Amino acid sequence: MPLTTPTLSRRGVLSGAASLGAASAVLAAGPATSPAAAQTPAAGPAPVPAGDVISRAIPRSGEVLPAVGLGTFLTFDVVPGQKRGHLIEVVRRFRAAGGRVIDTSPLYGSGEITVGAALASIEGTDDVFVTNKIWSTGEYLADDSHARRSLDQSLGRLWREKIDVMQCHSLVNVDVVVPLMKAWKKEGRVRFVGASHHENAYQSVLAGWIGRGGLDFVQVNYSIANRAASVLKEAAAKGCGVLINMPFEKARLFKLVEGRPLPDFAADIGAKSWAAFFLKFVLGHPAVTCALPSTSNPDHLVENMEALRGPLPDEAMRARMIGHMESLPGFAELMSTPWYPGKRYPGLIARAQAELRARA
């Protein structure tokens, strides 16, 4: 399939937690800009026309998906009454650029509600491929009442009759939830069954579930800075789809390269921004079905979608990309630095965390 590479401006990289505690401190500090200012996107790169995009087939069905999707953790969480026009614009530009996969969760504050509002207000979103999550225990072992309420709530918030991929969020109650999701799949409430995590220590657990043959998808962390991807080999061997979270390492990669030019060889893979550079590295792994970068900035969304066009790096190029990053001061320590340097997301999650700290 022929590919074209759009002309995009270099991303204005982020300026100013490896643990939940560190993330809490970042979230609670308040917004870097006012919500009112954030709702109206500044003039920036025009949306990339859909055209031909880098796509991957779902191993279990053969359905083809664009290889860059949209994550919503923190970025789509806003408190009631806060402006969210900029987030609807993110979704509009995502669709205009050929994007289709949107990932969310009931744990992402008002993320599901924001996604649902955007999809309901934008024409041509019926084919959006929604990946969602379930975090549920129940009143007793194998009680599904909490899970059923969560699924019904998610469907209502997202204005959907069916979820494309339902994932056991962070492997919570996985022994009960995976069989339950299989029942939902049989009953036609979800299309595919998956499980997710964002820490290296749990990749072996995800690989074990793939080995049992119970999962259609896994969602896992992987980036040019964190290449501990043991689960990807098992997914490729068993025909399991792979969704990638944290391809930018919670904005830490952008902080590392702030003010630095792209290496000259980035042109060989059509990367005109650091966002495309980092995403193309991830997509260069053949086991990856779709990467899920998150953003609340419409212009950054356009630059993320640049990675959908042009060539992908082969193994020699990927090694060269790693070598360049390893030459940068601070790269070796990046994974121990706080999430979202200089960023603030004052949504329901941040508010609840601040209230809990005050009570404690």
Image (cartoon, helix red, strand yellow):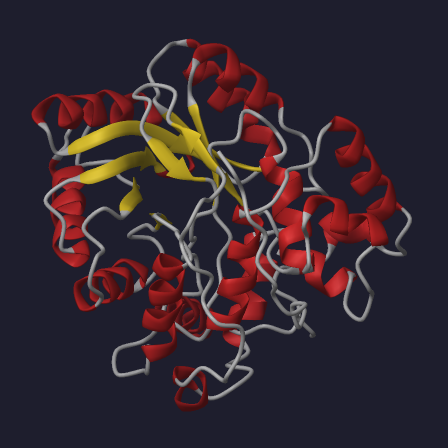
- Does any portion of residue 79 appear in the rendered image? yes
Q: Residue 39 appears at what percent x and percent y?
A: 39, 83
Reply above or below: 103 against 219: below
Q: Is residue 161 left or right of residue 43?
A: left
Percent x, y for residue 160? Answer: 14, 49
- Where does the image place residue 40, in percent across and percent down from the top left? 40, 85
Q: Quadrant for residue 358, please give it.
A: bottom left
User: Residue 96 at what x, y percent from top left?
Assistant: 37, 61
In the image, 327 versus 67, the foreground residue is 67
Q: Residue at x 47, y 47 (%)?
A: 292
Q: Residue furthest front?
A: 2
Residue occupying image coordinates x 61% and y 29%: 285
Name the quarter where the C terminus is drawn: bottom left
Q: Is residue 64 above or below residue 344?
A: above
Q: In the rendered view, does 337 fall on the left or right side of 339?
A: right
Residue 141 visible here: no
Residue at screen point 61% across, 33% down = 200
Q: Is residue 256 left or right of residue 290?
A: right
Q: Quadrant of residue 202?
A: top right
Q: Nearer the viewer, residue 66 or 175?
A: 66
